[in-house]
Amino acid sequence: MKTWSNNRICGLLGIDYPIIQGGMIYNSGAKLAAAVSAAGGLGLIGAGSMRPDLFGDQIRKARTLTDRDFGVNIPLLYPHSAECVEVALAEGVKIFFTSAGSPKKVIGPLKNAGCTAVHVVASPALAVKCQAAGCDAIVCEGFEAGGHNGRQEITTMVLVPECVAAVDIPVIAAGGIATGQQMAAALALGAVGVQIGSRFAVSVESSGHGLFKQAVVDAGPDDTHLVLKAHVPVRLLKNVFRDRITALEAAGAGRDELAAELGTGRARRGMLEGDLAEGELEIGQVSGLIDDIPTVAEIMDRLLNGFDEALAKLHPNT
Amino acid sequence: MKTWSNNRICGLLGIDYPIIQGGMIYNSGAKLAAAVSAAGGLGLIGAGSMRPDLFGDQIRKARTLTDRDFGVNIPLLYPHSAECVEVALAEGVKIFFTSAGSPKKVIGPLKNAGCTAVHVVASPALAVKCQAAGCDAIVCEGFEAGGHNGRQEITTMVLVPECVAAVDIPVIAAGGIATGQQMAAALALGAVGVQIGSRFAVSVESSGHGLFKQAVVDAGPDDTHLVLKAHVPVRLLKNVFRDRITALEAAGAGRDELAAELGTGRARRGMLEGDLAEGELEIGQVSGLIDDIPTVAEIMDRLLNGFDEALAKLHPNT
């Protein structure tokens, strides 16, 4: 069985296993983050779908659910991001994952407060910028990841070794990772840990709507695609809304037309309210491998067991 | 150091290492295939860019270059595919990789002749069909692969475990694999071998034009994209021609308009004749990790050493 005492990311974040739960709007509240941290990984409360007051409430709530440290994920292009950083700092959060924007915006205050700062990237060029800005680690997230995604379309298999070659700070792999075998693959590529979204979104403790979770369970290998590339690229599960977007794109629709069709509030409608036809259903391509809705503790067990099984198969004499 | 004596694909194909060189038009002639087989992998002579008489010549030429077995790759949608199958059978070839089409077309004659038949797939659904048709193994090729590609856009990280779960026959991983670390990742995902294209295309022994090889060496992480999706999806290196295609696609061009702009002979022009502006430059996303033009023997050494390095890092106590 793999021991993790020498793992760089476990040391940096004070966790037992190098497994981080990604911030996911409408899915990653106090309950999910606390469950992942309690199980020895790192839970993140995602600020992207919360107003600052709700975000503060969720941080305080998570403290009542576990004694282990958890972190926050704050998308920096979100209108309330600066306020959310202030709220989390005031609440004494010590681990910040940021995404969607430049880490330069916030790295000063975070490092002054003695926090650990990690930024999510989709290219080795941004990885280099994060290291130069003072980030402690990066998450590199491949094309297969759910939700908002890079325009470069670099997959996890290619992006991880590119980022590992580009920086000295620890690299956490994300995108397409839901099993222990995929975790082993990510570490073989040079990552020191994994960030997992979709698999944790489809757990008992996730705050997503039950119908959304079931739709992911029912999804097949070809049911997510990256769409809205001319606006903001996002990987969505197939539904009535996404089909309309795909048809508009095939007809050459521009940014404004796509933004108008998207409107506002669709992510909430899909993932929190369970409108499977008209909501945005943000989830990763790995949906095709997600077949049930277990507890976080069960998911962690499967990840660690699957990792050990993969290692055994790679043994020099097998 | 890893030993490979128990590896299923080494046993099936009679090779020392589970490394297969992909068939690549204008790159994989006798010289490349013989060099890969001589180094302990499996070389494939690619029929896709050859008329049947040239294909027969190349098979005979490869026999003069190595005593080891090599195979052929025949794209089944190619006009001369049936004739090429006959030529290879007449020449006594025993290992057939087929792609782009249904393996049902050719599996009967191949099995009757005592050949090993492997088909390339981009989805677990096609993997299941290949097993039912009687294929001995499949290559599952992810979105990051160069050249022609599936519409599903499933990445290697996700596609490999999906195919491994779907079939009992051996699964060979392809797409995004140019290093031993990536080979280790593929095997962690459950593949028993790898098929490598781009890395072997950029070798001394590849028959591609020197300017094409150098363009891949010079390429950065964001320089290949999958285009022509409304026609036949293909991953190409950025150049003047691809920029025109991308502009047409953004404007909503249909299949006919794209086919007209593509015309004929562009792959030959780009990869064999070295027209870097107007040719089709088919290569994988892993170009960003390819920085030189070594011999096949050197590439094989790097792959095996990199694999062992990845395994050492994954050791239970590190």
Image: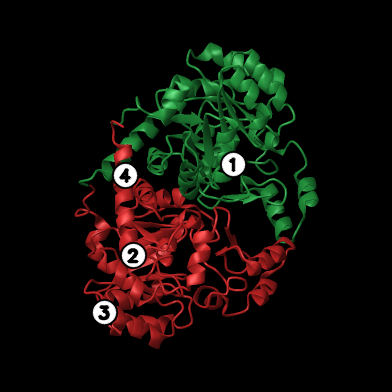
Chain colours: A red, B green
Identify the mark at residue A309; answer none if there is no mark.
Answer: 4
Give the mark toward the camera: 3 or 1: 1
Question: Along the line of sight, which residue is nearer the eye, B98 or A223?
Answer: A223
Q: Residue at x 35, y 55 (%)?
A: A167
Chain ID of residue with mark 4: A
The quarter of the picture where residue B248 lies is bottom right
Q: Of the residues under marks 2 and 3, which one precedes in the sequence?
A: 3
- Report which residue position mark 2 lands on: A296
Q: Are marks 1 and 4 on the same chain?
A: no
- Report which residue position mark 1 lands on: B126
The quarter of the picture where residue A42 lies is bottom left
Q: Which residue type carries mark 1?
A: Leu
Q: Of the residues under marks 2 and 4, which one precedes in the sequence?
A: 2
Give the quadrant of the N terminus of chain B: top left
Secondary element at image label 1: helix
Q: Is residue B77 above or below residue A58?
A: above
